[in-house]
Image: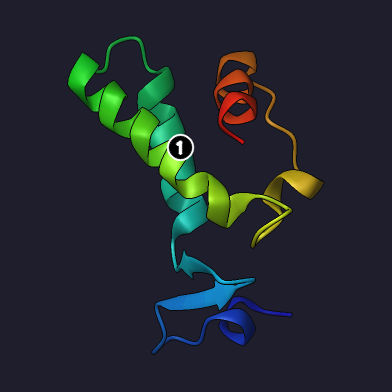
Amino acid sequence: MRAQDILPDDINQVHINDVPVRKGTVGAFLANARVWLNPDAPAEDQAAAEQDIIDALPALTALTALGVFEFLSIRNSKLNNLVVTHL
């Protein structure tokens, strides 16, 4: 299966088990994790990244949509604790 089999170029969102999943959800999660974990990032940027991580969890989890954490584990303990706390 290729990316375009799930979301063709002309479609930006799909509903999986009634959860909206936008194109770029996984990439945004990773970008936000980098900001949230960066000790040099401004506090307001870290807070916004944290909220965006939490907001993305329904689309990323196994019980709802993509199932990312069913197959991949988070090696960073701080990020893992944030995700586990909000699942």
Q: Residue 25: x percent and y percent?
A: 47, 56
Examine the rendering and report whether any part of residue 42 can be seen. Answer: no
Residue at left 50%, top 87%?
8
When the figure is inspected, residue 53 is found, relative to residue 6, above or below; the finding is above
- Taking the image as shown, residue 82 lies to the left or right of residue 40, namely right
Q: Quadrant of the C terminus?
A: top right
Q: Residues within 10 Å of mark 1 (few under 14, many from 20)?
A: some
Q: Where residue 27 appears, x then y in whole percent?
A: 47, 51
Horizontal arrangement in the rendering, residue 60 relative to residue 29 (left or right): right
- In the rendered image of this protein, does residue 6 appear above or below residue 22? below
Residue 16 drawn at (x, y percent): 61, 72
Going 39% across and 36% down the picture, which residue do you hit?
32
How did the renderer colour the structure? Answer: rainbow
- Is 56 placed above or below 13 here? above
Residue at numbered disc 1: 54
> Picture quarter containing residue 42?
top left
Q: Quadrant of the N terminus?
A: bottom right
Callout 1: SS: helix
